[in-house]
Image (tube, coloured by chain):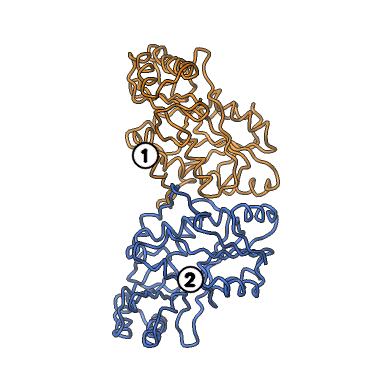
Chain colours: A orange, B blue
Amino acid sequence: MKILKTIEELQEVTSSNKTKTTGFVPTMGALHDGHISLIKQARNENEVVVVSIFVNPTQFLPGEDLDAYPRRDEADKKICEMCKVDYLFMPDISTMYTEEEVLIKAPNNSYVLEGKTRPGHFDGVLQVVLKLFNLVQPTRAYFGKKDAQQLTLIQQMVKNLFLPIEIVPCEIVREKDGLALSSRNVYLDETQRKDALLISKALYSAASLVGKSELKASALKEKMQEVMQTLDVEYIAVVDRNFNEIEKIELKNSIILVVARFGNTRLLDNIWL
Amino acid sequence: MKILKTIEELQEVTSSNKTKTTGFVPTMGALHDGHISLIKQARNENEVVVVSIFVNPTQFLPGEDLDAYPRRDEADKKICEMCKVDYLFMPDISTMYTEEEVLIKAPNNSYVLEGKTRPGHFDGVLQVVLKLFNLVQPTRAYFGKKDAQQLTLIQQMVKNLFLPIEIVPCEIVREKDGLALSSRNVYLDETQRKDALLISKALYSAASLVGKSELKASALKEKMQEVMQTLDVEYIAVVDRNFNEIEKIELKNSIILVVARFGNTRLLDNIWL
């Protein structure tokens, strides 16, 4: 595995692999089994695998956890090596950004749910993903379904900007007890870790109810709220694949989303029906 | 020459020419000798030449001349054929845009001169150029120096977004009497056409003065204003290559810009020192 730090190194690799299929997994590091599942799938489906680790400052809002965000470079390198990654790109902030930048703006319809709670967050996500896409020029790029709205917006960017890239959505990986894996789970203390189980519990019970009856979204959300009544729930939402909130739940076209707060930590989870 | 109308046709061409050098000339049609000089240079320097003709609605502000903008598709096709263009891309608006779009925002330092007079104009320019770049994936793209600020911003976008494209700035082509070629020159009546000559006259006299003495920009602008005193001058500016206005004129690093109005028609001209 080669570790690349500069634009020039990466562009040379990209240029020399122009005729090969390339799988790309962009990450912010602190790799867990969720990331590993993305990397493994990329390894299975492509001749070349590129992983990036970059804690992107433009997607953090003022007051968010940019400085505290977990960094585990040495462990991450070993994980990538074990997963037979070909190239690991680990740029500095000054490598990725200049003082004045052409900016990316998420579409107007993205200012709901995460886009509403974290205005500007998705602008930063799309900006760094577009930069990385242009550098790596992957055949396929792999994203987890846990960040569902992010995944949808990246798909929209690829479509709008005519990027010749296949976005591969990957299933959420969970702990044995159901907790969705997240680099931010390390922030949880013992009690919070235990309480957090109610999120996946609420989602599972919702999914099983949807199969059985003609529940409206509002009734479903009430039942989920009951399961999570001891939690600081920020939102429960039922949306279609374009992230429009819906009342009539359609199997195969709906996503149920939960965000709950544990102290300063926001945990996201969802189920794609 | 093949005329392409759809994204799919163009993407197939791009994909099959992946190992060849491609020169790209994006235009809004109504081709004149300025465009032809870009196309000829592209033809000289590349294996494949792609020209696009698309009057891009997102770069026109409300009330501007979108509907009146000159369209001469049949003449343009013949010109491209004569210039040995390989592929002419002429998409519809609905091919290029959907209802909701991920947007491009020109950097904050671009809201001067054209960016100030036409707020949002450059956002639209960068948006369509980025879409076209992603579709064509050119080795080199050719832009005239007449739209100097546009050229500078496209170079900045390429740098910021790490696009593996060489931007080739091309000299302004003029009528024998000095008028810079522009698709908008057709709007001028006989008197306006004659008056418009004062723009290039003022620029030439400024350029010759700069060589001879240590003139400050403000003094230079006064002298130019004298030459153009009968015109409705919108601005005269002296900027460096980053479009910061300067007072001390540096040879090889300054651009002198003029915009003047003739009825509803704005004419731009400039000289790169």
User: Which of A270 and A101 lies nearest the eye of the viewer?
Assistant: A270
Residue designated by label 1: A111
Per the image, label 1 sits on a secondary structure element best described as loop
Residue B202 on image: x %, y %: 37, 83
User: Which of B150 and A204 lies nearest the eye of the viewer?
Assistant: A204
User: Which of B2 and A95 lies nearest the eye of the viewer?
Assistant: B2
On-image quarter of the N terminus of chain B: bottom right
Q: Is residue B165 left or right of residue A187?
A: right
What type is the residue that disc 2 sits on?
Lys
Q: Which mark is residue B3?
A: none
> Which subunit holds the residue at mark 2?
B
> Which subunit holds the residue at mark 1?
A
Location of residue A203 by image quarter: top left
What type is the residue that disc 1 sits on?
Tyr
The answer to whether A8 is drawn above or below residue A253 in the figure is below
Q: Which mark is residue B145?
A: 2
Location of residue B90 by image quarter: bottom right
Badge 1, how many Cα within 10 Å: few under 14, some, many 20+? some
